Image (tube, helix red, strand yellow):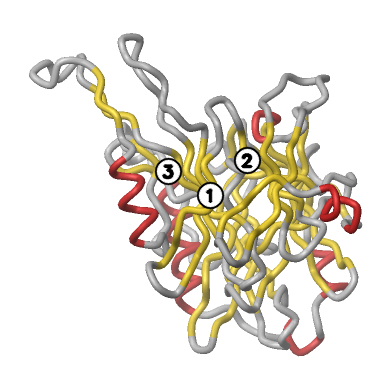
Amino acid sequence: MVLGVPGRVVFAGLWLALTPVGVLSQEPPPGLVWYVLDELNHTGFDIEDPTNRPIPLSEPPAGVLLPVDVSRDGVVDWLIRWPEDQRLCGTGGCRLSLYVSDDNRYLRVFDRQAWDPDIRTVGDEIRLEASFHHLNCLPPREVCRLAWAWDPTTRSLSERPSSDGEAVVSGFGEGTVDLGEVDGRPKLPDDIPAAVFDRYLAGRRACGNPNDADAFTVSYPAVASTPDLNGDGQRDWVIEAPSFCAEQAAADYGYEVWISDETDGASRAFVAAPGRWPAFQVDRTPAGMLDARPCLTGEICETVPLEWNRAARVFRPASSESLSSRP
């Protein structure tokens, strides 16, 4: 592996080692070439001084569009290692994008800023790994590594243990794609089940006088996709209680777990007490569900393991027998 600017990994040599020869010979799709050129040429434009801009690019810089085979199906995928530029980098690192082939199209499965990204083979998987802000770690620590591998069932990246030995992922950690915002709040994924979306809308809370635009605000619950929690092969969902105003009482729950199903899209399977936090143990399939107490860096985070009750379709505190049988 070759290192460039500190904190930024240059992938080219590593991908040459991990990628089949047939994939390496592929030319990038014209649409991806156009997209990269459009992004790079657009970021070079100075709206305050239109004459102050570099010469427009006519082809992607070397090492930006890299052929890969993350899904290991022999069909080329494409990694976009965006140049190190202040317009593409920030406190969260530099932007990295991954498109995985799916029949006659490409799925955007990773697209966000990340620190120290890395690619490694673990068993029969190729894993993408990166560092993120410590606020999304459980237990809290200054740098948290998160890892993912391709899941052919969900056609998406699924959480995996990271190379630093951590196998617990915070429930509202880092999504693989930064969807941006709409009307000042995070944009929701396109595949959110209708039942989860309805709960999202029902859970919003208004603050202030609605006749005073400067004082009136509406807070919404946070929604996040989770790894498969009940063994049906589908990703599930968590909903975090919204914030509240000084004159309001806090919500009577901390978060909810919603399990994907074929009837209503998703059904509520667990309601946590206020002040609790979801976490998932991703060194097993399905992932283990943990009900956690928020804690500070250096503290021991109390977690209560939960188990899936298939008959009632809910999560309950794990029995001593269940805990003794776990690896």
Q: Secondary structure at mark 1?
A: strand
Q: Position of residue 67 (x, y in %)?
A: 69, 75
Upstream in the sequence, badge 3 or badge 2? 3
Residue at the image point whose x is 70% and y is 44% from the top: 290
User: Is 48 left, or right, of 66 in this rendering?
Assistant: left
Residue placed under numbered mark 2 in the picture:
278
Q: CA distance from mark 2 to mark 1?
A: 9 Å
Residue placed under numbered mark 1 in the picture:
257
Could you say which is closer to the camera, residue 11 or residue 54? 11
Q: Secondary structure at mark 3?
A: loop
Could you say which is closer to the camera, residue 168 or residue 136? 168
User: Is 234 left, or right, of 147 in this rendering?
Assistant: left
Q: Is residue 130 visible?
A: no
Upstream in the sequence, badge 3 or badge 1? 3
Q: Position of residue 200 (x, y in %)?
A: 35, 45
* Quadrant position of the C terminus in the picture: bottom right
Residue at the image point whose x is 80% and y is 77% from the top: 19
